[in-house]
Image: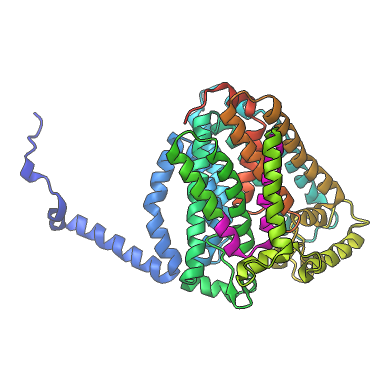
Amino acid sequence: MEKEIRQFDILTGSGKLDSPKFVVFLLSITAISIWLITKLGMSGALALLTLPFLLFYFYGLFRKPAIGLWAAIIVGFTLLGFARYIDADIQIGVAMDIVLALTYVAYVMRNFHEKKIWKPAKNEATLLAAIWFGYSLLEFFNPEIQSRAAWFSGMRGISLYMMMIIPLALLFIDNTRKLNFFFTLWGVLSILASLKGIIQITLGPDPWELIWLGTPSGQTHMIWGQLRAFSFMSDAGQFGANQAYSAVIAVIVAFAEKKKGRRWFFLIVAALGIIGMFLSGTRGAISIPIAGLAFFFVLRKSGVVMISGAVLLLFVFVFFKFTYIGQGNSFIRRMRSAFNPNDPSLQVRLENQRTLSVYLATRPFGGGIGHAGVKAKAFLPNAFLSNIATDSWYVLIWAEQGIVGLVLHLFILLYVIIKSSYRIMFRIRDPILRMKMSALAAGMMGVMVASYGNAVLGTMPTSLLIYTSMALLLNTKKLDVHPTQT
């Protein structure tokens, strides 16, 4: 006979404190929490705060593996900036590796009994990523390599994430509803990034950010006594470029939206993105909206649109190049210097490129992945390449992977742009999808142009957004089959 359960026999709330076992459990948890915070400081506190969310995340991930892709994009926006708040000596970048690896594990387990689970990822974008990843693996045997650890660290950002993100984008963004979610998530993160940058300029950096500003990496963020906003990203250069990139995407997507609420949302993303670009003081970032919108006007195939766009861009060029309007504003003044061919920093970059050209003349495969630029100093502080600032993304590829690697890299980027442009202009039937793909192509073109002046393309979050865009741009046939959902 089942035992009768009486309401007053059930301990709830404060009544559980009468149970010795519960009190011991509670005290144990409290003691462990205090010990972690005491031993690990901020790291321990954050670990305790994030533990419940991690458990909830794992539960959701193995039910819906697509969550892993969205998590990777969120982590991409915040991960490098998050390192400022961590005292522990850990490789925080490994967190992205874990997120992506777990996503693949969850996808396989979720579809364990299904056949052809990788079929959606069989796309030319995956093939291009595999070729580039394969070349990076072969660089492991480059005779110029002095540090295998440097190769591994550099290879992850240069090709591994591309190889992991593109198939996930093909698997999980397979209709316009999910495409819309991708744009919305991107927009929300961009708004938060801009707001954080505005807070840094208006209210000042927080205590942890002030400490970082005193490091060699942070010292470049004060120019003429004016702080350059960096938000919660790796630095001001990435913040400014990514916000300009987001602005180009958002303003085009806004005109593709039928619902007024979503249209206004993306217009706000675009406006805050431009503000973030200026607050960052990143001069090269201004080339993203100029090149991106110019390319968009070409994709529209409309004489009126092209002429109107050309007039608008000409106005912007004249404003910065031939006028002194707003010169009293430090952010406008710094942006204006990007149009000066005699700018001292530009001359230094050109001199560095001339030095590299001599070194690389006999090294067609470069000096080794992870061996060039400031980041290489952590592994090779006295090496030749690590003491020459590469600045440009393409110069970095050239220095580390040689002329062979640079040509292959440019071929892949241009292949995506040219083929997707043809599909946008002549093949996509859905006009709304055409506009949204035009946004991705225009944004990618802007980042490609800006990457000549800064290492924009290979740094998170821009790199993850570019890789996702590449997958979508070469998957328009599948997206065009589904009716547009808003």
Q: Is residue 433 visible?
A: yes
Q: Is residue 292 left or right of residue 194?
A: right
Q: Is residue 40 left or right of residue 360?
A: left
Above or below for 93 versus 124: below
Asked if the magenta segment contains residue 286, the reply would be: yes
Query: Which residue does the image show at 6% across and 39% down from the upper left?
Result: 6
Q: Is residue 296 magenta?
A: yes
Number of residue marks = 0
Q: With 440 as the anchor, is 352 left or right in this view?
A: right
Residue span colored magenta:
274-299
Which residue appears at 54% of the width and 49% of the height? 270
Quarter occupied by the N terminus: top left
User: By what rule are the colours in the image chosen?
Assistant: rainbow
- Position of 138 relative to 362 (above/below): above
Query: Where does residue 415 sit, x and y in percent of width and height?
Result: 76, 36
Residue 34 picture location, percent across and down: 34, 68
Task: Where is residue 446? Give x, y as percent.
Answer: 69, 48
**What's the residue at 65%, 54% (across, down)?**
459
Q: Main secondary structure of the magenta part?
A: helix
User: Looking at the picture, how far across and down is residue 209, in whole percent?
Assistant: 52, 70
- Relative to 349, residue 478 above or below: above
| Residue 35 in which image quadrant | bottom left
Residue 162 in sight here? no
Q: Nearer the viewer, residue 290 or 185?
A: 290
